[in-house]
Image (spheres, grey):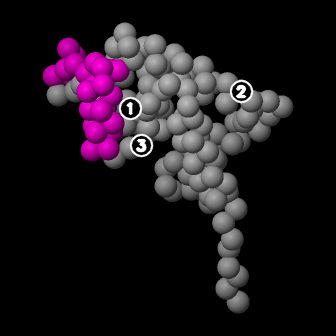
Amino acid sequence: MNKKRHLKILPQLHRAIHQLGLFIAAPEGIDVTQAEAIILAFLSDHQRATMSELHRAFGHKRSTLTSVVDRLAARGLVNRKVSSGDRRSFVVSLSRKGSAVARRLHRRLAGLEAAALKGVSDRDLAKFLELLARLGTGKPHA
């Protein structure tokens, strides 16, 4: 008999991602999409990144990532320049205006994350991150 397997984590993961989008869009004077917010927060931590590094970090389709970065650049939040080390590659960095927005977003997201992780052990966090990594590859281990 073929027993139907019920989804256990994906509905909750989807709900969490949806709630994150609503949290980012909350009236805070920051008018960015969820994808834009995460890239800005990432750049707040890393200062600059190549398009390839952003792709590895977030897994967006390259065309989607280019569109997100184009929108951020058009609004003056990021600068995109040809890499001096590889002229086929672009480096994305925060503009002065983008730095201010990114710091606000980063503080907001860091506060949300800290609240969510309150009372979570390092071991449980490591297991959760391992699970997310498995889901992120699209090829979960057996």
Query: Mark 1 and mark 2 in contact (Cβ < 8 Å)?
Result: no
Left or right: 30 in relation to 10: left
Residue 118 position by quadrant: top right
Q: What mark, if any, has residue 114 been given in the picture? A: 2
Q: In the rendered view, would you say 2 is above or below 52?
A: below
Q: Quadrant of the C terminus?
A: bottom right
User: Judging from the image, what secondary structure is the residue with disc 2 in?
Assistant: helix
Q: Quadrant of the N terminus?
A: bottom right
Q: Residues within 10 Å of mark 1 (few under 14, many from 20)?
A: many
Q: What distance separates the C-alpha of mark 2 from that of mark 3?
A: 24 Å
Please tell me which residue is depicted at 48% across the width and 26% down the height of the picture: 30
Q: What distance separates the C-alpha of mark 1 from that of mark 3?
A: 8 Å
Q: What type is the residue that disc 2 sits on?
A: Ala
Residue lying furthest top: 96
Q: Nearer the viewer, mark 2 or mark 1?
A: 2
Q: Nearer the viewer, mark 2 or mark 3?
A: 2
Residue 46 visible, this orientation: no
Q: What type is the residue that disc 1 sits on?
A: Leu
Indicate yes or no whether the magenta region holds residue 123: no
Please tell me which residue is depicted at 64% across the width and 59% down the height of the picture: 11
Residue situated in front as seen by the camera: 100 or 67:
100
Q: Which residue is mark 1?
A: 54
User: Judging from the image, what secondary structure is the residue with disc 3 in?
Assistant: loop
Q: In the rendered view, would you say 64 is above or below 3?
A: above
Q: What distance separates the C-alpha of mark 2 from that of mark 1?
A: 23 Å
Residue lying furthest right: 119
